[in-house]
Image (spheres, helix red, strand yellow):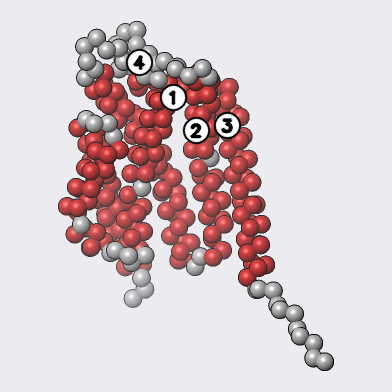
Amino acid sequence: MTQIPEPEQPASEPSFVSHLVELRARLLPCVAVVLIIAAGLMPFARQLYGWLAAPLLAQLPAGGGLVAIGVVAPVMAPLKLVLVLAVALALPVLLYQAWAFIAPGLYLHEKRLVLPLLVASTSLFYLGAAFAYYVVFPLVFGVTAALAPEGVQVMPDINAYLDFVLFSFLAFGAAFQIPVVVVLLDRTGLMPAEALAAQRPYVIVGAVVIGAVLTPPDVVSQLLLAIPMWLLYEAGLLITRCTRRRARELRPT
């Protein structure tokens, strides 16, 4: 009697399990770094929230300030800020672990492209958040306080203010990624720099629309996001042309 061979295990199963093991090995340092940074920042939670609230408090009239509506809001808002700051400060480590996880599956030219883009993306995110804090917030809060109706005392809730600031950091940090996106579109061939340059009028209109959606309903804050987005788009095109010229110079004849 002929014995029926047992079905072989799929060849992809060991590979899938090894990927899961590798993913766990990459996630554990990420979690550890975030927790260590959060523990180090925890004693300074109140001071950090005071630093975050400084642009608003500087624009409020004498006697104005933030209020805490919730019962535990005075404690939870600074703790939430500490956790978010811990993730933001750990961003280089998080991106490095993501890079180390995907690097074995990349070609050499892709590795040469991805690592500089990760560094540029992290730097631009920090730059966008700094631009929002030091440039946008003083102007926006000044306009908001000046336009308050007569007899209305501006006293925002600490949780509402924190959510607004964190969303603004995320919006400006994401907007400052435009040069990276432009370079990626050109290098991957999805849209060459010449085609991107031809879309300039639509990009300007889109920047104005995005600025109107992501910022408070005043012209100043809308332009403070729209104009940098357009300038960053032009910077991405310039970087693309420079890298192309550099590649032609290094190409052997």
Looking at the image, is mark 2 or mark 1 earlier in the sequence? Answer: 2
Mark 3–mark 4 Cα distance, whole angstroms, equals 29 Å
Q: Amino acid at mark 3?
A: Ala
Q: Which residue is mark 2?
A: 85
Q: Is residue 249 left or right of residue 230?
A: right
Q: Which residue is mark 3?
A: 38
Q: Residue furthest front?
A: 1
Q: Is residue 49 visible?
A: yes
Q: Badge 2, how many Cα within 10 Å: few under 14, some, many 20+? A: some
Instruction: Please give the name of the residue rendered at 42% of the width and 27% of the height, measured from the top-left corner.
Output: 162
Q: Amino acid at mark 2?
A: Leu
Mark 3–mark 2 Cα distance, whole angstroms, equals 8 Å
Q: Which residue is mark 4?
A: 155
Instruction: Please give the name of the residue rendered at 62% of the width and 34% of the height, measured from the top-left corner.
Output: 36
206 relative to 159, above or below: below
Mark 1–mark 4 Cα distance, whole angstroms, equals 12 Å
Looking at the image, is mark 3 or mark 4 earlier in the sequence? Answer: 3
x and y, in percent, of residue 20 in the image: 63, 58
Looking at the image, is mark 3 or mark 1 earlier in the sequence? Answer: 3
Looking at the image, is mark 2 or mark 4 earlier in the sequence? Answer: 2
Q: Which residue is mark 1?
A: 159
Q: Amino acid at mark 4?
A: Met
